[in-house]
Amino acid sequence: MINYYEKIDFNQTVYTLSPSGMGVYEYNLGALAEEHADETTTPRGIAPRMFVKNNELRTWGVGGNNEALVNQFETNAQAEHALLLCHLYDLNNHCDAPTVFYTRDEAEDAYEEYLGGEGGKQKLEEQLCKVCKLAIDGEKTSEN
């Protein structure tokens, strides 16, 4: 269950690992959450399942054609914040969404671990050099 009044700063900077494993990316939390919002087919095309209309948080429903009220708020800003909380839920629970780190140190530690612990970055660079060398040697051989 989502607490629609939870205080989260969606303007804060968060970090993820790049999909290719080549570094740490920096994002605005709100923008990253919106990017990974659950989508559905609606009468207007593909759109996020949850949306705001005036002071109301609404959903298109499971089939995408059953617009329904989820919650009503006193202000539009509260409804927009609740919408971002829904998108954050999607980000945290979607299997294809990146892991979010709230500090650069956490992200860099995870990146180092991903690369194989101490010296992992150097190992990766050495492997890339070997691949480049093989590619260059292969081009030289095919030219002869």
Image (cartoon, helix red, strand yellow):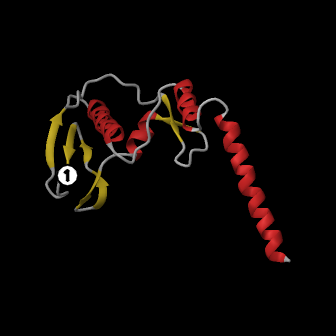
Q: Residue furthest bottom?
A: 144
The answer to whether 87 is drawn above or below residue 110 in the figure is below
Residue 129 picture location, percent across and down = 75, 50
Task: Mark 1: give few (<14), some (14-19) or many (20+) Cα within 10 Å.
Answer: many
- Residue 58, by quadrant, is top left
Q: Quadrant of residue 10?
A: top left
Return the residue nearer the eye: 33 or 113. Answer: 113
In the picture provided, is 93 more to the left or to the right than 12? left
Image quadrant holding the N terminus, namely top left
- Rendered residue at 16%/35% (across/down): 71
Q: Quadrant of the C terminus?
A: bottom right
Q: Nearer the viewer, residue 106 or 37?
A: 106
In percent of the image, x 30 and y 33: which residue is there? 85
Where is residue 93, by image quadrant? top left
Work out which residue is located at the far top of the displayed protein and give it. 7
Give the number of callouts: 1
Q: Secondary structure at mark 1?
A: loop
* Residue 29 in the image, given as x and y percentages of width and height: 44, 34
Q: At x 54% / y 37%, what residue is drawn? A: 114
Along the line of sight, the residue nearer the viewer: 47 or 63: 63
Side of 31 where 54 appears, left or right: left
Establish if 42 lies above or below 27: below
**Amino acid type of the residue that numbered disc 1 sits on in the rendered structure:** Trp
Q: Residue furthest right?
A: 144
Q: Nearer the viewer, residue 100 or 75?
A: 100
Task: Say if 91 sits above or below 104 in the image.
Answer: below
Tell me the residue that label 1 is attached to: 60
Residue 21 image offset from top left, x and y in percent: 57, 44
